[in-house]
Image (cartoon, rainbow, N blue to C red):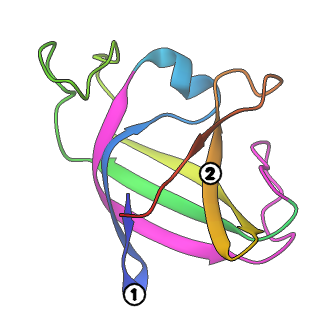
Amino acid sequence: MRLDDGGTATVMNLDGQDWSFDENWRMSGKGTWKLLGSGEYRGPRLASDGQTVRLDVKSGKTPPGKNDPAAEGREATPPAESYWIISIAAEKSQTKLYFFTGDPDARSTLEFSKE
């Protein structure tokens, strides 16, 4: 995932959030992002009490093929568009971005790392 100045975004092989994760697709494409203030997002997929990022993406690529290492058992066709609510957490001297995957009660997370 790349979040650029001006609110544009590019994602590559991004798993679905919450129950969408269990549909076994990964999305690549372009979209937009917006920083939401503390308490601004009040939807069902609340990941944090602090700031969050809303990421909206339109699929721009077919799912990875069976021989693509990025597939890892996730070859289902992604939806034409989707969105993610990504939590922002400050830990020590680092900022952590993450979202929940699978059953929301399990609270499994996908955490982003910086390249």
- Quarter assignment of residue 42: bottom right
Q: Amino acid at mark 2?
A: Tyr
Mark 2 lies on residue: 98
Location of residue 77 by image quarter: top left
Of circles 1 and 2, the one toward us is 2
Which quadrant holds the C terminus? bottom left
44 versus 58 height, above or below: above
Magenta stretch bounds: 25-48
Using a 10 Å C-alpha cutoff, classify the residue at mark 2 as few (fewer than 14 neighbours), some (14 to 19) or many (20 or more): some
**Percent from the top left, x then y, of residue 59?**
28, 44
Q: How far, Cα to Cα, is label 1 from label 2?
A: 21 Å
Which residue carries the number 1 mark? 6
User: How many numbered circles does the render carry?
Assistant: 2
Residue in the image at 17% along x and 40% along y: 61
Q: Is residue 11 above or below residue 18?
A: below
Residue at x-position 60% and y-position 59%: 97
Question: Disc 1 marks which amino acid?
Answer: Gly
Counting from the top left corner in percent of width and height, residue 98 is at 62, 51
